Image: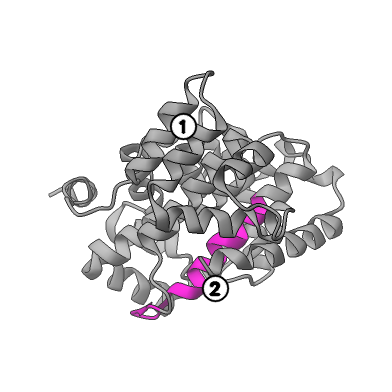
């Protein structure tokens, strides 16, 4: 019996795995048309009042630099641009789909997990900025969702998830290593399947699928490398908890390709701290 194959088939067969809201699909289609106006995007978002209120809360936070100044979704689109609004909608949608406030499961603290995910998003954005990458918003989302496979395991594969958590605690090792040892399949692959089913951009899919072994990312390597680096930084800074208390070794390839030896790590860590402070708004949506 191929345990890895069976587990991946089980994931593919879960009919209740949430889908991305219809409004996001509609916005994606609208953005493909260069004639689309800010008003059309605004109308599409306001068809989902819950989502619209979350978007307004986010765009008026310190994270986007316009605290309390944006009164409508259309105004937000004009000020921040189509791409940023799409990323905000995606972020709000992911939280809406998965976040269970205060939930604890078999020694896995969901609040600390979400803080780790948000911090990784903030750190990814900081690293992207420090190395001069223009894809800062994409880096934030990639960092935010890098561990989404763990949520699938927790909510839909309870027996296996319990075993992984127990193994991780007993051996004091990486969650990732426990997954490989027990089932030969990890949250990377499971998260990758989810991202694929959501038709997320390939750079986000790759960051989720390969953040523990970025050299396997044959395309969109930079986003994956940034998330790999950010994940290690926030673990070292003890920001949240992804399910274990270990700090993985940073890939030599990532260290060199991002040019980290030429950066002031102290300045980078200070910037990560500043960005993480701004992201507290994400714990409130």
Q: Position of residue 118 (x, y in %)?
A: 57, 61
Q: Residue at x 30, y 39 (%)?
A: 197
Q: Residue at x 31, y 52 (%)?
A: 184
**148 drawn magenta:** no
Q: Which residue is mark 2?
A: 245
Per the picture, the main secondary structure of the magenta-coloured stretch is helix
The image shows residue 190, relative to residue 152, as above or below, that is above
| Corner quadrant of residue 154 | bottom left
Q: In the drawing, does residue 74 fall left or right of residue 268?
A: left
**Which region of the structure is painted magenta?**
103-124
Q: Residue at x 63, y 35 (%)?
A: 81
Q: In the drawing, does residue 206 fall left or right of residue 250?
A: left
Q: Residue at x 69, y 60 (%)?
A: 68
Q: Are marks 2 and 1 in contact (CB under 8 Å)?
A: no
Q: Which residue is mark 1?
A: 202
Whether residue 135 appears in this view of the structure is yes
Give the distance between the C-alpha atoms of the residues marked 2 and 1, in whole angstroms: 30 Å
Name the residue nearer the viewer: 75 or 116.
Answer: 75
**121 drawn magenta:** yes
Q: Residue furthest top?
A: 34
The mark lying in front, picked from 2 and 1, is: 1
The image shows residue 206, relative to residue 102, as above or below, that is above
Q: Residues within 10 Å of mark 1 (few under 14, many from 20)?
A: few
Circle 1 SS class = helix
Q: Position of residue 17 (x, y in %)?
A: 25, 53
| Corner quadrant of residue 226 | top right
The image shows residue 6, relative to residue 196, as above or below, that is below
Q: Position of residue 214 (x, y in %)?
A: 55, 41
Q: Position of residue 263 (x, y in %)?
A: 85, 47
Colouring chosen for the image of the structure: one colour
């Amino acid at each position: 019996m191929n345990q890895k194959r069976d587990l991946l088939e089980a994931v593919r067969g879960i009919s209740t795995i949430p889908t991305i809201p219809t409004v996001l699909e509609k916005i994606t289609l609208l953005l493909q048309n260069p004639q689309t106006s800010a008003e059309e995007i605004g109308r599409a978002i306001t068809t989902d009042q819950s989502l619209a209120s979350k978007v307004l809360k986010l765009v008026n936070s310190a994270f986007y630099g316009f605290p309390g100044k944006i009164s409508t979704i259309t105004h937000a689109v004009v000020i921040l641009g189509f791409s940023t609004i799409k990323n905000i909608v995606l972020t709000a949608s992911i939280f809406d789909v998965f976040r269970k406030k205060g939930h604890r499961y078999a020694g896995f603290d969901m609040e600390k997990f979400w803080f780790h995910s948000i911090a990784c998003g903030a750190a990814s954005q900081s690293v992207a900025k420090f190395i001069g990458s223009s894809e800062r918003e994409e880096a934030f989302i990639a960092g935010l969702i890098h561990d989404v496979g763990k949520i699938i395991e927790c909510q839909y594969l309870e027996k296996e998830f319990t075993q992984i958590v127990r193994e991780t605690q007993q051996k004091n090792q990486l969650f990732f290593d426990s997954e490989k040892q027990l089932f030969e399949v990890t949250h990377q692959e499971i998260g990758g399947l989810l991202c694929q089913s959501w038709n997320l951009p390939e750079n986000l899919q790759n960051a989720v699928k390969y953040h523990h072994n970025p050299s396997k990312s044959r395309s969109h390597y930079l986003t994956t490398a940034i998330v790999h680096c950010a994940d290690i930084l926030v673990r070292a800074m003890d920001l949240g908890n992804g399910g274990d208390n270990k700090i993985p070794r940073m890939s030599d390839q990532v260290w060199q390709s991002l040019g980290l030896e030429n950066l002031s790590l102290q300045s980078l860590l200070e910037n990560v701290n500043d960005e993480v402070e701004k992201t507290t708004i994400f714990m409130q949506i």
